Image: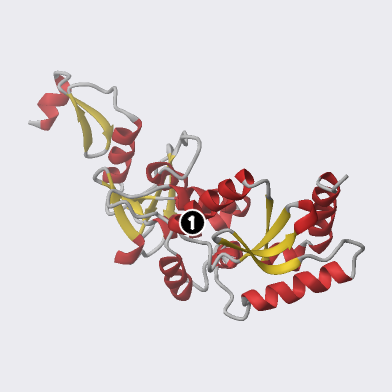
Amino acid sequence: MIADAARYGRAHRLYRGVYAVGHEKLSWKGQCSAAVLACAPAAASYWSAAWLWGLATYRPSRFDLTVPSRRGHRRRQLNVHYAALGDEDLAEVDAIPVTSVERTHLDLAASHPRSLPKLLERAEEIEDEQGRRLFDLRRFESLLARTRGHAGHKPLSEALTIYRPDPTVLRSDLEKRFRALLRASSLPLPSHNVNVGPYELDCYWLEHSFCVELDTYGTHGSRRSFEEDRRRQRELRRLGIEVERVTDLQLRDEPGEVLAALAVSLERRRPA
């Protein structure tokens, strides 16, 4: 029956055992689904998975698939990868089997480590159908715990560093480090934990109407905190106070750049 349908143009062979019914003008997702079916059991992976999840900014021209074995899966027009994936590494997007968000990052970390920051940033921005962000640090950590031999393990773990709250970094520690940095420079010292209206400012230069907020991801990593910080900054600007944010990682890795930026801001707002 299938042979007759193909002979009379009702079915169009895409791969062995996979046909398009009625026409060959398939969408990209239709072609991806056909490729997955041709190599079943298989899952769209790497850049194909990144596109399906909305993480990639360009649509790949070839389809990446991950299959459990090398038997019978050679296709010239497909990029076939081999790995035994567990249930936690698999998902579905528009009824297409696909590697999970975390596994997709891990695979791309091995071949495209420089793309990781942008991919992780996109995962933070995108929400699933339940309104949850795709990025979940706990799932990433679980993946890393069971894939220590994977080539993408180290670059992914390093890229996730900024998302891991450091329990040893407390607000008081940041204030001490920041004040020590200022004392070693020629910049004027601020007042600390000053109340202005309903807000408590971490470091405040009254004469300059300028303040620095000391941030860590662990205390400012949620959507609610993100929105509250913007509202707070807007209200302080209305009061004539300029706000600059300094993170614990910037203070640790870029102290010179932090001081240079502060010097410019303080000079610009120096009282006449």
Front residue of 46/139: it is 139
The residue tagged 1 is 105
Q: Picture coordinates of residue 128 (x, y %)?
A: 33, 50
Q: Quarter of the image holding residue 28? A: top left
Q: Is residue 42 left or right of residue 254?
A: left
Outermost residue to the bottom: 168
Residue 135's x, y, as percent?
43, 57
In the image shown, does 121 or 48 lie closer to the viewer?
121
- Residue 144 drawn above or below residue 10: below
Residue in the foreground of this view, choosing between 268 and 130: 268
> Where 123 falls versus 172 (above or below)?
above
Residue situated furthest left in the rendering: 1
Residue 72 in sight from this viewpoint:
no
Query: Is disc 1 placed on a helix, strand or loop?
Result: helix
Question: As shown in the figure, which amino acid type bears the numbered disc 1?
Answer: His
Residue most extreme to the top: 8
Indicate the quadrant containing the N terminus: top left, top right, bottom left or bottom right.
Answer: top left
* Colouring style: secondary structure
Count of all numbered marks drawn on residues in the image: 1
Q: Quadrant of the C terminus?
A: top right
Neighbourhood count class around disc 1 (C-alpha, 10 Å): few under 14, some 14–19, many 20 upward = many
Q: Quadrant of residue 54?
A: top left
Residue shown at the point (58%, 53%) measured from the top left:
117
Q: Is residue 136 above or below residue 96?
A: below
Give x and y (percent) for residue 226. 50, 54
Residue positioned 46% across, 48% down in the render? 125
Q: Indicate left or right for 167 with 83 as reference.
A: right
Q: Does residue 20 appear anywhere in the picture?
A: yes
Q: Residue at x 36, y 62 (%)?
A: 89
Please tell me which residue lies in front, 122 or 143. 122
